[in-house]
Amino acid sequence: MCLSSDFVIQNALGTLMSAMGCDLNRSMQHF
């Protein structure tokens, strides 16, 4: 199961986007 890995990646991406304050965060949520 890649759920664990996916969760970690999403968390890292979310934190990074949040720090950057980019609107891409919403795009990632769609993904």
Image (cartoon, rainbow, N blue to C red):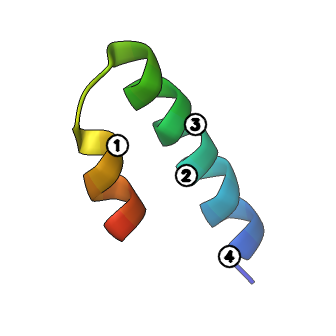
Residue depth check, mark 2 versus mark 1: number of the one nearer the observer: 1
Residue type pointed to by label 2: Gln
Q: Secondary structure at mark 2?
A: helix
Q: How many residues crowd mark 2 within 10 Å: few (<14), some (14–19), many (20+)?
A: some
Residue placed under numbered mark 3 in the picture: 12
Q: Are marks 3 and 4 in contact (CB under 8 Å)?
A: no
Residue placed under numbered mark 4 in the picture: 2
Marks 2 and 1, Cα distance to the nearest angstrom?
Answer: 10 Å
- Please indicate, yes or no, whether residue 31 appears anywhere in the rendered image: no
Location of residue 6 in the rendering, given as x and y in whole percent from the top left corner? 61, 64
Q: How many residues crowd mark 1 within 10 Å: few (<14), some (14–19), many (20+)?
A: some
Q: Are marks 3 and 2 in contact (CB under 8 Å)?
A: yes
Q: Secondary structure at mark 3?
A: helix
Location of residue 7 in the rendering, given as x and y in whole percent from the top left corner? 67, 59
Residue type pointed to by label 3: Ala
- Indicate whether 25 appears above or below 10: above
Where, quadrant-wise, is the N terminus in this rendering? bottom right
Residue placed under numbered mark 2 in the picture: 10
Dot label at residue 5: none
Location of residue 16 in the rendering, given as x and y in whole percent from the top left corner? 46, 25
